[in-house]
Image (spheres, rainbow, N blue to C red):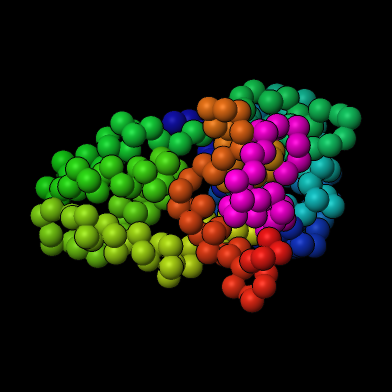
């Protein structure tokens, strides 16, 4: 309450020109705050706010922040920092950046990009939280998940929020009139996720894993033990993207069973002789 919130998503801007980036940003200012802006330089991106009353309170949410073109990403962050220093002279009070990486690790120059108030890590659901979420649907609709379905949803997703919601959504959408969602119905959804679904979440996991294919294949197809070391670039990126975690023996292990199954299928050596070489 009391804040005017603007939101913009830069998921597919990694190769976008500065002109395309600025056009989208200017359109966002106009859409949410009715600010007419034709700025063409990142350094002037917040200039239109300077003429507004500072007693208004703006919050800017930038989703998929890693999708911004690296050529001007750092400059954009520094512009945010400059806006922070003059925050008493304009309405922009807070900027929220949403992405999979720690923002401190994204910027590699020597200057601090801006003053970070909070760096929030959104964890996976615990089994209790997963069951609590499913119970909300049961209470509101009267449709029940069998105990084994609840157990398997947590097991296959490891509590990854998007997958938990995805499995539940598939079940209730496919069987809207059933009073009890059964294990056989769950198995059909699991088969769909593993063998049929073209899922954005899973596609991103596979693409990230392909960048470090040797280490992923060692974990998939051999008994090799790889120490979990966050300073190792491959481990850090695979962990940040939810592919690997540290197990009880401090070794790298797959985090989400569904991801492991899809990666196994994606990297399986079907070509004759390729399995021997691996």
Q: Is residue 215 magenta?
A: yes
Q: Is residue 122 above or below residue 161?
A: above
Q: Is residue 204 magenta?
A: no
Left or right relative to 127: residue 40: right
* Image x and y of residue 223, in percent: 60, 46
Quadrant in which the N terminus appears: top left
User: Which is more toward the observer, 40 or 119?
Assistant: 119
Q: Residue furthest right?
A: 110
Q: Residue at x 77, y 62 (%)?
A: 15
Instruction: Compare residues 226 and 15 and report the one nearer the observer.
Output: 226
Q: Nearer the viewer, residue 148 or 38?
A: 148
Residue 239, visible in the rendered structure: no
Q: Can residue 116 be seen from the camera position used here?
A: yes
In-image side of 194 versus 274 (left or right)? left
Q: Position of residue 48 (x, y in %)?
A: 73, 44
Q: Position of residue 132 (x, y in %)?
A: 27, 35
Q: Position of residue 216 (x, y in %)?
A: 65, 51
Residue 128 relative to residue 199: left or right: left
Residue at 61% x, 33% y is: 251
Q: Quadrant of residue 196?
A: bottom left
Judge by depth and name the residue closer to the eye, 86 or 7. 7
Residue at 60 percent across and 58 percent down: it is: 206
In the rendered image, the quadrant that contains the C terminus is bottom right
Q: Is residue 72 above or below residue 187?
A: above
Segment tinted magenta in the rendering: 208-234
């Amino acid at each position: 309450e009391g804040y005017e919130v603007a939101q913009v998503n830069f998921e597919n801007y990694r190769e976008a020109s500065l002109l395309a980036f600025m056009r989208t940003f200017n359109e966002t200012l106009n859409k949410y705050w009715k600010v007419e802006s034709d700025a063409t330089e990142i350094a002037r991106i917040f200039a239109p706010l300077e003429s507004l009353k500072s007693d208004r309170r703006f919050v800017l949410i930038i989703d998929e922040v890693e999708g911004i073109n690296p050529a001007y990403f750092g400059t954009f962050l520094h512009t945010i920092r400059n806006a922070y220093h003059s925050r008493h002279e304009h309405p922009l009070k807070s900027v929220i950046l949403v992405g999979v990486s720690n923002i401190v690790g994204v910027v590699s120059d020597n200057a601090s990009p801006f003053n970070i108030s909070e760096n929030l890590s959104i964890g996976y659901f615990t089994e209790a939280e997963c069951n609590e979420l499913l119970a909300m649907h049961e209470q509101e609709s009267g449709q029940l998940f069998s105990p084994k379905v609840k157990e398997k949803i947590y097991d296959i997703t490891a509590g990854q929020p998007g997958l938990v919601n995805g499995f539940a959504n598939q079940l209730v959408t496919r069987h809207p009139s059933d009073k009890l969602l059964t294990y056989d119905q769950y198995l059909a959804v699991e088969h769909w996720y593993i063998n049929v679904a073209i899922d954005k979440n899973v596609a991103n996991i596979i693409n990230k894993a392909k960048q470090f294919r040797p280490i992923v294949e060692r974990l998939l197809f051999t008994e090799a033990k790889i120490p979990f070391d966050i300073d190792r670039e491959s481990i850090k990126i695979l962990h940040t993207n939810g592919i690997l975690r540290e197990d009880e023996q401090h070794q790298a292990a797959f985090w989400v069973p569904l991801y492991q199954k899809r990666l196994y299928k994606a990297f399986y050596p079907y070509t004759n002789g390729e399995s021997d070489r691996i």
